[in-house]
Amino acid sequence: MRCPYCGSEDSQVKDSRPAEDGAAIRRRRICPDCGGRFTTFERVQLRELMILKKTGRKAPFDRDKLLRSFEIALRKRPVDRDRIERAVSGIVRRLESSGETEIPSEEIGLQVLEALKGLDDVAFVRYASVYRDFSHADDFEKVIAEISAKIARDPGA
Protein backbone atom coordinates (compact mmCIF):
# COMPACT_ATOMS: atom_id res chain seq x y z
CA MET A 1 0.00 0.00 0.00
CA ARG A 2 1.46 3.36 -1.04
CA CYS A 3 2.17 5.82 1.80
CA PRO A 4 -0.12 8.88 1.53
CA TYR A 5 2.58 11.08 3.07
CA CYS A 6 5.79 10.30 1.16
CA GLY A 7 4.52 8.07 -1.67
CA SER A 8 6.71 5.12 -0.67
CA GLU A 9 5.56 1.89 -2.31
CA ASP A 10 5.82 -0.11 0.92
CA SER A 11 4.03 -0.01 4.27
CA GLN A 12 3.75 -2.39 7.18
CA VAL A 13 0.52 -3.54 8.80
CA LYS A 14 0.65 -2.95 12.56
CA ASP A 15 -2.91 -3.92 13.49
CA SER A 16 -5.92 -5.53 11.77
CA ARG A 17 -9.45 -5.83 13.06
CA PRO A 18 -12.97 -6.32 11.71
CA ALA A 19 -14.96 -3.18 10.89
CA GLU A 20 -18.45 -2.31 9.67
CA ASP A 21 -20.05 -5.33 11.35
CA GLY A 22 -17.53 -7.70 9.76
CA ALA A 23 -18.05 -6.36 6.22
CA ALA A 24 -14.54 -4.88 6.13
CA ILE A 25 -11.11 -5.18 7.70
CA ARG A 26 -9.53 -2.09 9.22
CA ARG A 27 -5.73 -2.06 9.00
CA ARG A 28 -3.40 0.36 10.81
CA ARG A 29 -0.25 0.83 8.76
CA ILE A 30 3.13 2.50 9.19
CA CYS A 31 5.53 3.65 6.51
CA PRO A 32 9.08 2.38 7.11
CA ASP A 33 10.53 5.34 5.17
CA CYS A 34 8.86 8.39 6.77
CA GLY A 35 7.22 6.82 9.86
CA GLY A 36 3.77 8.05 8.82
CA ARG A 37 0.80 6.14 10.22
CA PHE A 38 -2.49 5.69 8.37
CA THR A 39 -5.57 3.47 8.23
CA THR A 40 -6.88 1.46 5.29
CA PHE A 41 -10.08 -0.56 4.87
CA GLU A 42 -10.38 -3.77 2.90
CA ARG A 43 -13.85 -4.74 1.61
CA VAL A 44 -15.23 -7.50 -0.56
CA GLN A 45 -16.30 -6.26 -3.97
CA LEU A 46 -18.70 -8.65 -5.66
CA ARG A 47 -18.75 -6.89 -9.02
CA GLU A 48 -17.63 -3.69 -10.66
CA LEU A 49 -20.58 -1.30 -10.60
CA MET A 50 -21.16 1.53 -13.05
CA ILE A 51 -23.51 4.43 -12.38
CA LEU A 52 -25.76 5.65 -15.19
CA LYS A 53 -26.06 9.43 -14.80
CA LYS A 54 -29.13 11.39 -15.89
CA THR A 55 -27.06 12.77 -18.77
CA GLY A 56 -26.45 9.23 -20.08
CA ARG A 57 -22.80 9.30 -19.00
CA LYS A 58 -21.41 6.33 -17.07
CA ALA A 59 -19.11 6.57 -14.06
CA PRO A 60 -17.59 3.94 -11.76
CA PHE A 61 -19.42 3.52 -8.46
CA ASP A 62 -17.55 5.20 -5.60
CA ARG A 63 -18.41 4.11 -2.06
CA ASP A 64 -16.56 7.08 -0.60
CA LYS A 65 -18.70 9.48 -2.63
CA LEU A 66 -21.82 7.78 -1.27
CA LEU A 67 -20.44 8.12 2.27
CA ARG A 68 -19.67 11.83 1.68
CA SER A 69 -23.29 12.37 0.59
CA PHE A 70 -24.47 10.98 3.93
CA GLU A 71 -21.91 13.05 5.84
CA ILE A 72 -22.96 16.27 4.11
CA ALA A 73 -26.66 15.62 4.77
CA LEU A 74 -25.91 14.66 8.39
CA ARG A 75 -23.44 17.50 9.11
CA LYS A 76 -23.89 18.72 12.71
CA ARG A 77 -26.63 16.16 13.35
CA PRO A 78 -26.51 13.75 16.34
CA VAL A 79 -26.12 10.52 14.34
CA ASP A 80 -23.48 7.97 15.32
CA ARG A 81 -20.78 7.26 12.71
CA ASP A 82 -21.46 3.50 12.98
CA ARG A 83 -25.09 4.00 11.94
CA ILE A 84 -23.93 5.95 8.89
CA GLU A 85 -21.43 3.21 7.96
CA ARG A 86 -24.13 0.53 8.33
CA ALA A 87 -26.50 2.50 6.08
CA VAL A 88 -23.83 2.94 3.40
CA SER A 89 -22.77 -0.72 3.63
CA GLY A 90 -26.41 -1.78 3.32
CA ILE A 91 -26.87 0.24 0.15
CA VAL A 92 -23.64 -1.12 -1.34
CA ARG A 93 -24.66 -4.71 -0.52
CA ARG A 94 -28.07 -4.22 -2.14
CA LEU A 95 -26.50 -2.72 -5.26
CA GLU A 96 -23.90 -5.48 -5.57
CA SER A 97 -26.41 -8.26 -4.98
CA SER A 98 -28.97 -6.81 -7.42
CA GLY A 99 -27.24 -8.65 -10.28
CA GLU A 100 -27.01 -5.42 -12.28
CA THR A 101 -23.66 -3.92 -13.23
CA GLU A 102 -25.13 -0.60 -14.38
CA ILE A 103 -27.22 1.21 -11.78
CA PRO A 104 -29.22 4.39 -12.54
CA SER A 105 -28.16 7.26 -10.28
CA GLU A 106 -31.84 7.83 -9.44
CA GLU A 107 -32.02 4.40 -7.82
CA ILE A 108 -29.09 5.19 -5.57
CA GLY A 109 -30.65 8.54 -4.67
CA LEU A 110 -33.89 6.84 -3.67
CA GLN A 111 -32.02 4.36 -1.48
CA VAL A 112 -30.14 7.22 0.21
CA LEU A 113 -33.41 9.05 0.83
CA GLU A 114 -34.93 5.92 2.36
CA ALA A 115 -31.89 5.39 4.61
CA LEU A 116 -31.83 9.05 5.71
CA LYS A 117 -35.53 8.92 6.52
CA GLY A 118 -34.68 6.29 9.13
CA LEU A 119 -31.62 8.12 10.44
CA ASP A 120 -32.60 11.79 10.75
CA ASP A 121 -35.51 13.92 9.47
CA VAL A 122 -33.40 17.06 9.02
CA ALA A 123 -30.81 15.18 6.96
CA PHE A 124 -33.63 13.67 4.92
CA VAL A 125 -34.98 17.14 4.07
CA ARG A 126 -31.47 18.43 3.26
CA TYR A 127 -30.78 15.56 0.87
CA ALA A 128 -34.28 15.66 -0.64
CA SER A 129 -33.89 19.38 -1.38
CA VAL A 130 -30.91 18.63 -3.61
CA TYR A 131 -32.05 15.26 -4.97
CA ARG A 132 -35.54 16.46 -5.85
CA ASP A 133 -34.20 19.84 -7.01
CA PHE A 134 -36.30 22.04 -4.74
CA SER A 135 -36.85 25.49 -6.18
CA HIS A 136 -39.49 27.01 -3.88
CA ALA A 137 -40.30 27.10 -0.18
CA ASP A 138 -43.46 25.13 -1.03
CA ASP A 139 -41.26 22.14 -1.91
CA PHE A 140 -39.83 22.12 1.63
CA GLU A 141 -43.30 22.52 3.14
CA LYS A 142 -44.59 19.46 1.27
CA VAL A 143 -41.75 17.23 2.51
CA ILE A 144 -42.08 18.53 6.06
CA ALA A 145 -45.83 17.88 5.89
CA GLU A 146 -45.08 14.27 4.79
CA ILE A 147 -42.75 13.82 7.76
CA SER A 148 -45.26 15.40 10.17
CA ALA A 149 -48.01 13.11 8.89
CA LYS A 150 -45.72 10.10 9.39
CA ILE A 151 -44.98 11.18 12.96
CA ALA A 152 -48.69 11.70 13.65
CA ARG A 153 -49.45 8.16 12.39
CA ASP A 154 -46.54 6.59 14.23
CA PRO A 155 -45.38 8.74 17.19
CA GLY A 156 -42.52 6.32 17.94
CA ALA A 157 -40.93 6.96 14.52
Image (spheres, grey):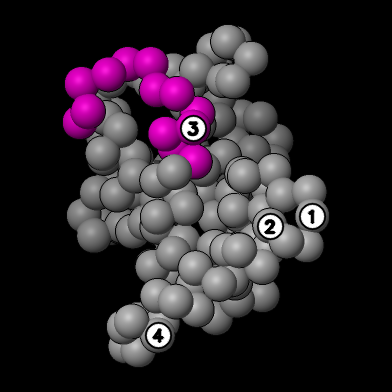
Whole-Å distance between the Cαs marked 4 and 3?
29 Å
Helix or strand or loop: what does disc 1 sit on?
loop
Badge 4: residue crowd in 10 Å (few <14, some 14–19, many ≥20)? few
List the residue tagged with mark 1: 136
Circle 4 or circle 3, nearest the eye: 4
Is residue 16 visible from the viewing direction of this image? no
Whole-Å distance between the Cαs marked 3 and 1?
21 Å
Q: Residue at x 46, y 61 (%)?
A: 116
Q: Position of residue 83 (x, y in %)?
A: 38, 67
Is 88 left, or right, of 10 in this rendering? left
Is 139 left, or right, of 64 in this rendering? right
Whole-Å distance between the Cαs marked 1 and 4?
25 Å
Is residue 88 visible from the viewing direction of this image? yes
Whole-Å distance between the Cαs marked 3 and 2?
19 Å
Precedes in sequence: disc 3 or disc 1 = 3
Q: In the rendered image of this protein, does residue 86 appear above or below residue 145?
A: above
Q: Which mark is residue 106?
A: 3
Q: How many marks?
A: 4
Q: Residue at x 45, y 23 (%)?
A: 104
**Region of the chain picked out in magenta, as a range:** 97-109
Task: Report the quarter where the C terminus lies.
Answer: bottom left
Precedes in sequence: disc 1 or disc 4 = 1
Amino acid type, residue under disc 2 in the picture: Asp
List the residue tagged with mark 2: 139
The reply to whether dot 3 and dot 1 touch (C-beta < 8 Å) is: no
Badge 2: residue crowd in 10 Å (few <14, some 14–19, many ≥20)? some
Precedes in sequence: disc 3 or disc 2 = 3
The reply to whether dot 1 and dot 2 touch (C-beta < 8 Å) is: yes
In this view, the residue in front, 3 or 102, is 102
